[in-house]
Amino acid sequence: MYIMCVSIVVLPLFIVPLTSQNSSIFVPSHDWQEVLPDHTIPPGLHVRQNIRTKYTEAKSIDKSSNVTDIISDGLENSLVNLSAYLRAGGAEKLNNDSATRFRPYEELMEDFQKINMNVKTDVEIMSELVMEIKQGNSTVERLLILLEDLSYYLHQIDNSKVFSESGFDLLTYHLRHPSYEVVKAALKAIGAATQGNSDVKVVALQGGVLDHLHSILKASINKQNSSKFSTLLLSGVSALSSLLRDFPSAQKQFFSASGLSPTGFELLAQLSHLNTLDANRDLRVRILTFLTDLYSERLGALSAFEKDPVDAKKYIWNLYASIPFEEKFLMHGFCETLRSSLLQDVQEGIEGNDLSIPTNHDIREKVITACLKFFNLCDWASLDYSNKQHIQSLLDSLIREYKLRSRSETNDIDSYFTDMLLKAQKLRSMVASNGFPKSDL
């Protein structure tokens, strides 16, 4: 079936533009006449497009007829022209044009069905990944791909909830895999599933995931000279952090003397003292950042309870208060670890104005943030003069550098270096109040 659109146009008096001096005015009659290209059509005429000749035609409007008569008359003439056009071979031409411009309905429906067949939900995809992993016949390379894909989908909260119903056993099983790369991938998947998801954290704790993480970190300590196991430890601490943050019940089990052995603080202290060069720096900073986050939670829970001592906030604070966090932090030497990290892991500020020198701002930020958070808990005044001089020199150099870098920042959104400057200045001011030399900056 072919449909031809026919336009019937009636030009009212108010839409015709003024003619130019170089154009001729069309002289109408009561019969249809061809309008030449250089003719201007005066207002009040009946105008049509002749489909057969493709020329514009016009005639006078009979005052005795109404608009309906005009449209009917025009439509009748247009249909006559259309019939003549089709008899003259226009139908075949239209058919060929349509075939080249448009795809058949059946072909379109077939494509849509193929697309629909290939659309799968996240849950369906995860189920297929889990099934293939469970088969146990994948190569290490294929297993790594499967675990990586699984981690991607587990970052979404709803997906993690579905997976947690039976999936953690599969991941903890692969923590015993002979390939350390597979173990790392399994740790990453555990971290992805538990991060920011309280319901999944509960399932993981009940399923013994914390015990498995503790065991793998403990077992890896004796393999500290291997760079491979250094990166494995980083993945393990990251997974542990994802599980324990904002979960005081799990924190209590990890840090309690009646829970795991060694206790959480003792285990983290041993890890932070490993001698693995650059990997040790990254691991130590990650552990300090982890403890900083937990301490911030603890202080936040106390502040919320003091401002509004309702039962719910009291219950949460009591969970945090049952953990001797500050006592164990001091007992296992984390103040010394923190000061060592400041002196050894933080790169000194640049000399001169060369801002192109490679700089690890992330480690600077994390260590300085940890120093600020734990400052009142640690004894800075008892440091020997040499360490005080070193810390003063380090902070002064950072202040100079970030003053220089912050000049390029023009708004609050782009203010990273300004924030770093403020943190360095704040820490410099705090150490100065503890017997450090005064600064001119």
Image (cartoon, rainbow, N blue to C red):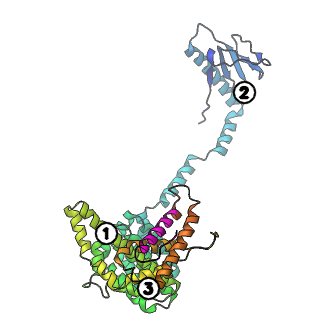
Identified at 44% across, 81% down, the residue is: 339
The percent coordinates of residue 30 (x first, y second) are 69, 10
In this rendering, the label closer to the viewer, 1 or 3: 3
Which residue lies under the disc numbered 3?
A: 384
Q: Is residue 5 visible?
A: yes
Q: Amino acid at mark 1?
A: Leu
Most common secondary structure along the magenta stretch = helix
Question: In which quadrant of the rendered view does residue 318 lie?
Answer: bottom left
> In the displayed structure, would residue 334 be above or below residue 159?
below
Distance from label 1 to label 3 (Cα)?
A: 30 Å
Report the residue that reaches farthest toward the top.
Answer: 64
- Front position in the image: 185 or 377: 377
Marked residue nearer the N-terminal end (1 or 3): 1
Disc assigned to residue 329: none
Q: Amino acid at mark 2?
A: Lys
In this rendering, the label closer to the viewer, 3 or 2: 3
- Front position in the image: 223 or 395: 395
Identified at 32% across, 88% down, the residue is: 262
Which residues are the magenta region?
A: 418-441
- Front position in the image: 436 or 369: 436
Report crowding for label 2: few under 14, some 14 to 19, many 20 or more residues within 10 A (C-alpha).
Answer: few
Q: Amino acid at mark 3?
A: Asp
Mark 2 residue element: loop
Which residue lies under the disc numbered 1?
A: 299
Which residue lies under the disc numbered 2?
A: 54
Magenta span includes 194:
no
Identified at 58% across, 10% down, the residue is: 65
Marked residue nearer the N-terminal end (1 or 2): 2
